[in-house]
Amino acid sequence: MARRIPKIHADFIIADSVIFTLLPSYILSKIYRIPMMVYCRELIPENPSREKTALNKLKDIVAKLLNYIRNSIMNKPKLVVAMDEGLMRYFQEKTGKQVYLVPSSTDLSLEYKDIRNELGLPADKTLVLYTGSYHTFRGLDLLIESFSKIKKDDVRLVFGGWKDDKDILFINDLIKKFDIEKYVISLPSLPYDKVPSLIYSCDICVEPRNKTGLQEFQLSLKLLDYFSVGKPSVAINASGNRILIKDGYNGLLSKYDAEDFAEKLILLLNNPDLRHELGKNARKTAIEKYDSRIVATEFENLVRTKLL
């Protein structure tokens, strides 16, 4: 990178908030005397570890040091932007510097088609889709408990995402506990270019994760994927999800409660017209506010105004 910057005559450097990118980028911006912009997309944990082992104490010390270095550097750039309101508020508080919001976006030019046959999904069932990782904090326990209250022969819950052996055991144990084996389809991991078609091939999409603390303000990227394909969604009623979902217009919001989540799913399962209307409005929302071309233009204008 140090060798390439003079060759391409860079006007500025973009670094993200990961310290191992931020620090060398800052050093290079000083060496070559070109402005730097920081893109805030992640945090370093600040809460001390619960188990006071020697290793955890060392991790806590390292985390404090990295946060100190990062927050010191974040005061230097001419422009700092964040991908969601939570990160924007966090870094403004930590650095005392103006942080601008450049929201996540979606590529509406991606092509998609019905691939039920290709994936072996039943053509005569209504499919409820979850995409993403199978980690325990993703709310899949609530989703599976909710689905156990439905158990309709013409409905299937489809899992499409990436997982490790521990995640698979976690999910399988929940499925057995709530006795819904016959109603669940777990797909193998798919390349990302298949995901839009997977979403398009299903009827209802879900985001069961309960975001708390700073994460509550973060917009779910999987919801953006659902919206871009024009699918109705049920999501937890958290601040970040409310940025995207207007309840009853382009999706449904649920309490973090299995009964309520199941009621929202049943409402959509029993009402194809409502599914169509919510999906149509979801696609409209994506086009009007989250098209990557529109966001890119706004980002470019911000850079030209504040950085160059």
Image: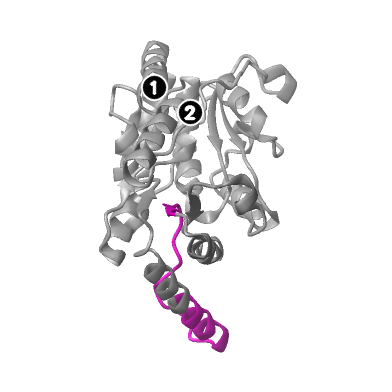
Question: Which labelled disc corresponds to residue 282?
Answer: 1
Neighbor class of circle 2 (other Cα within 10 Å; few <14, some 14-19, many 20+) is many
- In the displayed structure, 256 sits above or below 267; it is below
Secondary structure beneath label 2: helix
- In the displayed structure, 37 sits above or below 291; it is below
Which amino acid type is marked by label 2?
Tyr
* Residues under numbered marks 2 and 1 in contact, where contact means CB atoms less than 8 Å apart: yes
x, y percent for residue 284: 38, 18
* Quadrant position of residue 87: bottom left
Which amino acid type is marked by label 1?
Ala
* Quadrant position of residue 104: top left
Secondary structure beneath label 1: helix
Q: In which quarter of the image is the N terminus?
A: bottom right
Mark 2, residue position = 226
Q: Residue at x 34, y 29 (%)?
A: 252
* Quadrant position of residue 179: top right
Disc 2 or 1, which lies upstream in sequence? 2
